[in-house]
Amino acid sequence: MLRLLQRTPAITPETPDGALVQRAQKGESAAFKALFERHVVGVRRFLRDLLRQGDLADDATQETFARAHAQLAKLTDYDRFKPWVLGIARNVAFEARRVRQHDVLEDDDDSTPTAVIPSPDPERVLLDAELEKHFTEAMGTLSGNRRAALLMRLDHGLAYEEIAAAFGWSIPTVKNEIHRARLKLRAQLLPHLTGERT
Amino acid sequence: MSRCGRTAHLEAVALGEASPTLAAELRAHTKSCALCRHELNWLESESALFRQRAGRDEVAQLWKGVASRSGLETPPRDWPRVLVAMAAAAALVLMVGNAAPRASRSADGSPGDETLESSMLMTPAFFVEEESCSKLPSGVGFQCSPVVPASFLASR
Ligand SMILES: [Zn+2]
């Protein structure tokens, strides 16, 4: 009987997502909870950035993980829980905002800043309350999809391939969207960043 | 504006994805290429902004909502009945143990070490790992639960 009990290995910080996904798919709720605890902070921040409302983000985070649990059997690429759950979060956010996903590529200002923008000194970048306000405002000027793509890359460290898979876009489209998002963000942040270098 | 073929590789440097060799080579290149230096400054500034923002993130207690929506509050359905029965038997052992003079109980209500020591429940695999509690950033609202399965506690 003890041998039966010992079949479930302990969950540690080193247990890879892929192993947790497989165990959760077999009904081990502790494994799913471990996935939740590992990713909830990022998913919640992602949703707050998309929805721009903290209370909506809390509910959307719970809905995202509830859907992830319900659909977990569909995740066959076990190691890709993070891009997969962020993809679900994006759908939840867009449903919440009633944004149709296919029309968002057009709702951005696609004029690319052409002037050379001076660059800030990265060692002097300090996100104080004032800068965070401008940062949030600048993020808010991006369309939902463009913002989601930028966040997945810069904030959540997803590869371009993973973002492309989550969005159903080509990799060049993802790169283009993120590039345009970056340029717009930079143009808006520059007046508020110190230590400019030319 | 002229272009440089290496600019596209700088993102991997700023995000820590480039190999140390490539990163060192590209950083050396930025000393002599104004275009790449300018781009790397921006990329690293963006990274700094996102990193600082992420560092102060807080999450409300959200697991309860997920668990209730997903039906995760109860023990897993496929948990072998024999384990449930064993947990109940073990609870009986503990209850007897608690009644004994040596029985101790920690401040959070979890069974004391002395009580558990003599129990067969010390089999490591029996205990549910909850170490992630202490690894969560401050403000994450999960309670570190006692290291015994929920069904075991429920049976007490
Ligand atoms: Zn260059």
Image (cartoon, coloured by chain):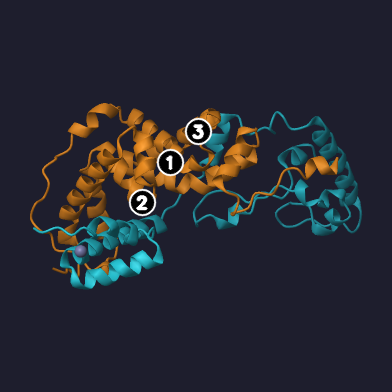
Chain colours: A orange, B cyan
- Secondary structure at badge 3 equals helix
Amino acid type at circle 1 is Pro
Q: Earlier in the sequence, mark 3 or mark 2?
A: 3
Amino acid type at circle 3 is Ala
Q: Residue at x 50, y 33 (%)?
A: A68
Q: Ligand 1 is found in which quarter of the picture? A: bottom left
- Secondary structure at badge 2 equals helix
Give the numbered dot on residue A68: 3
Of badges 1 and 3, nearer the viewer stands 1
Q: Quadrant of residue A13?
A: bottom right
**x then y, percent, for residue A131:** 24, 59
Q: Is mark 1 within 8 Å of ligand 1?
A: no
**x then y, percent, for residue A21:** 57, 39
Mark 3 residue crowding within 10 angstroms, few (<14) / some (14–19) / many (20+): many
Q: Looking at the image, do the residues carrying marks 1 and 3 touch, with CB atoms under 8 Å apart?
A: no
Q: Residue under label 2, please give it.
A: A155
Q: Nearer the viewer, residue B144 or B49?
A: B49
Q: Is mark 2 within 8 Å of ligand 1?
A: no
Q: Residue under label 1, please give it.
A: A83
Judged left or right of residue A116, residue B96 is right
Give the numbered dot on residue A71: none
**Relative to B90, does residue B13 appear above or below in the rendering?**
below
Mark 1 residue crowding within 10 angstroms, few (<14) / some (14–19) / many (20+): many
**Relative to B10, does residue B82 appear above or below in the rendering?**
above
Q: Chain of mark 3?
A: A
